[in-house]
Amino acid sequence: MNRIAWIFVLALVVGLVPAMADNWDWTFTSPTFSGIGIVDIVGNHGVSGGGTVTYASVGHSVDFVTGSGSNSLYQWQDDLTPYATPQLPAYPPGFGILFANLLQTVQLNIWYQTDTGSYYGSLSVDGNSYVTPPGAWGEQGTFKLTSVPDGGTTLAFLGLAIAGLAGLRRKLSL
């Protein structure tokens, strides 16, 4: 009996270790462009991820840019607070999270603007100019982070159920 208890504990621990990773789906939708993908968050910092930005019916693959920095178009940081509202820290205009392709020709910057209480996004598909209405460098939109269910917990419970059935079978001598 003691061996079966240890098997239960081992199955639970092995199954729950992957559950410690925070994987989140992200979406941003504005009148001109949209983006969708996944970002991995540790603490309150994005550490990896990517997705697809769609503009004029063309999809562009982008990766999450970690750390903080700036270039000729944007300033960014990797702070994300998925359980809070807003999900991005409130910064002055121009700061936000950045998704970009390898050459940074396609860049999507998303930020939360405190004076309007709204999310904004700005897109560049050439690395030099904004794809927004004339005179604007950002466009109001909807930003959401949604938790991705972890398969490790499911597998742990499935393993426990199978081990429980095996134990029940032995106990009942079936």
Image (cartoon, rainbow, N blue to C red):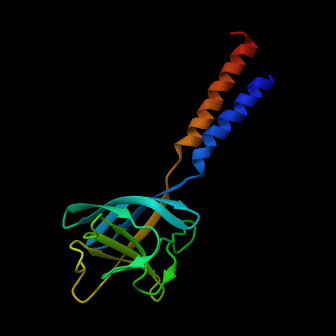
Q: Quadrant of the C terminus?
A: top right
Horizontal arrangement in the rendering, residue 26 relative to residue 6 (left or right)? left
User: Can residue 138 be seen from the camera position used here?
Assistant: yes
Q: Is residue 111 above or below residue 2?
A: below
Which quarter of the picture shows residue 51? bottom left
Find residue 76 and report its horizontal and vertical position in percent: 42, 77
Q: Report the number of numbered marks.
A: 0
Which quarter of the picture shows residue 165? top right
Find residue 6 and report its horizontal and vertical position in percent: 75, 30
Find residue 63 and report its horizontal and vertical position in percent: 36, 62
User: Can residue 76 be seen from the camera position used here?
Assistant: no
Q: Nearer the viewer, residue 7 or 166?
A: 7
Q: Residue furthest top?
A: 173
Q: Residue at x 30, y 64 (%)?
A: 101
Find residue 14 and report its horizontal and vertical position in percent: 63, 38
Which quarter of the picture shows residue 171? top right
Q: Quadrant of the N terminus?
A: top right
Q: Is residue 50 above or below residue 129?
A: above
Q: Is residue 148 above or below residue 15?
A: below
Q: Residue furthest right?
A: 2
Horizontal arrangement in the rendering, residue 14 relative to residue 33 (left or right)? right
Q: Residue at x 57, y 39 (%)?
A: 154
Q: Is residue 172 above or below residue 143?
A: above
Q: Residue at x 69, y 16 (%)?
A: 169
